[in-house]
Amino acid sequence: MLKLDQIHKTYMTPQGPLRVLENVSLTLAPGQSLALMGESGSGKSTLLHLAAGLDLPDQGHIALAGQNLASLAEPARAKLRREQLGLVFQQFHLVPSLSVIDNLRLQARLAKREDADWSAHLIERLGLEGLEKRYPEQLSGGQQQRLAIGRALALRPALLLADEPTGNLDETTADEVLELLLSLVHETQCALLIVTHSLQVAAPLDRCLRLRHGRLLDAAL
Ligand SMILES: Nc1ncnc2c1ncn2[C@@H]1O[C@H](COP(=O)(O)OP(=O)(O)OP(=O)(O)O)[C@@H](O)[C@H]1O
Ligand SMILES: [Mg+2]
C-alpha cells in the first residue's frame, strides 16, 4: 500500500542544511495500521507529507498504491492522493464556505466516487445527524474533527494518514474522537498511518515505530 525505500530529506534553513530523515524505510500492507511516534521536531510530519506526495524526498523512492511518486507529475500525484488517500491533520482544514454534508462529500465528489448511503452512515456514526446544513464554524472542535475524519473516509480510501488528529482537542474529546477514528478505520478496512504521542493509541495497532535523530526505530511500548 505504502512503501518508503531509503528516504533522505534535508531542509535548507538560514542556519544551514537540516537533515531530518536519514535512510528511512517502511512498508505498510493493505489494511495494516502503524503508529509513528517521536519527539517534537523528529520529522513525523515530514514523513507523512512525503508519504502523501505533498513533498518529495532528496533521495530514495516512495510508492503509493504501487505507483512511484517521483515518476508522477503533480497533477497525477494529486489525482492519486484524491483517489487513494484520506488525510487528517491536527488543524481540521474544513472548507468554511461549505456545509457539513458538502465538506463530507467534497473529496469523494472530486474523485467522482460519491456514495450517498456511506455518507449517511458516516454522518450517523460521527454523531453529526441533524447538523448537516451547519457550517464548520458552527461546530465544536470535536465535531469539526469528526467531520474531517468523515471527509477523509467518505471515498473509502485505501490509506488514511493522520497527523496528531486530536492534538487540538481536550483529553476527553480526544479519546472519544480517536476511538471513533480507529473504529471507522476498522470498518473501512483501510491501512492507517497515524502520528501520535499516545501510547494508548499506539498499543492496539499492528506496529509502532519511533523517529529519532532522523532514523526510524521499532518502538518498545
Ligand atoms: N519547510 C521546512 N523548512 C525548513 N525546516 C523545516 C520545514 N519543515 C519542517 N522543518 C524542520 O524539520 C524538523 C522536523 O519537522 P516536522 O514538522 O517533521 O517534525 P514533527 O516530528 O512533526 O514535530 P511535531 O511533533 O512538533 O509536530 C524540525 O526541526 C522542523 O523545524
Ligand atoms: Mg508534526
Image (tube, helix red, strand yellow):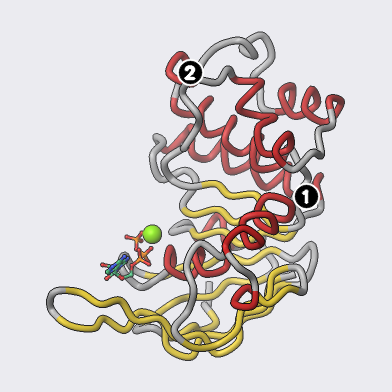
Q: Is mark 1 on a helix, strand or loop?
A: helix
The relative height of residue 108 versus residue 10 in the rendered view (above or below) is above
- Residue 61: where, in percent of width, then height? 60, 84
Q: In which quarter of the image is residue 11?
A: bottom left
The residue drawn where x is 60% and y is 87% is 5
Q: Could you classify mark 2 by the number of other residues whose Cα lies within 10 Å: few (under 14), some (14-19), or many (20 or more)?
A: some
Residue at 46% across, 37% down:
93
Q: Which circle, 2 or 1, is nearer the viewer?
A: 2
In this picture, residue 14 sits left or right of residue 159: left
Which secondary structure lies at badge 2?
Answer: loop
Q: Where is residue 39 in the image (x, y as percent from the top left)?
A: 34, 69
Quarter of the rendered structure image containing ligand 2: bottom left
Q: Which residue is found at the position 50% from the left and 60% from the top?
A: 195
Q: Which mark is on residue 64? A: none
Amino acid type, callout 2: Leu
Q: Point out residue 218 in the picture as x, y percentages from the top left corner.
A: 55, 82
Q: How many marks?
A: 2
Q: Position of residue 18 (x, y in %)?
A: 26, 81
Looking at the image, which residue is at 58% across and 71% down?
208
Q: Do the CB atoms of the residues marked 2 and 1 lie less than 8 Å apart?
A: no
Q: Classify 24 as above or below 180.
A: below
- The residue that disc 2 covers is 139
State which quarter of the image contains the N terminus.
bottom right
What residue did someone put label 1 on?
186
| Vertical placement of residue 189 versus 69, above or below | above
Amino acid marked by disc 1: His
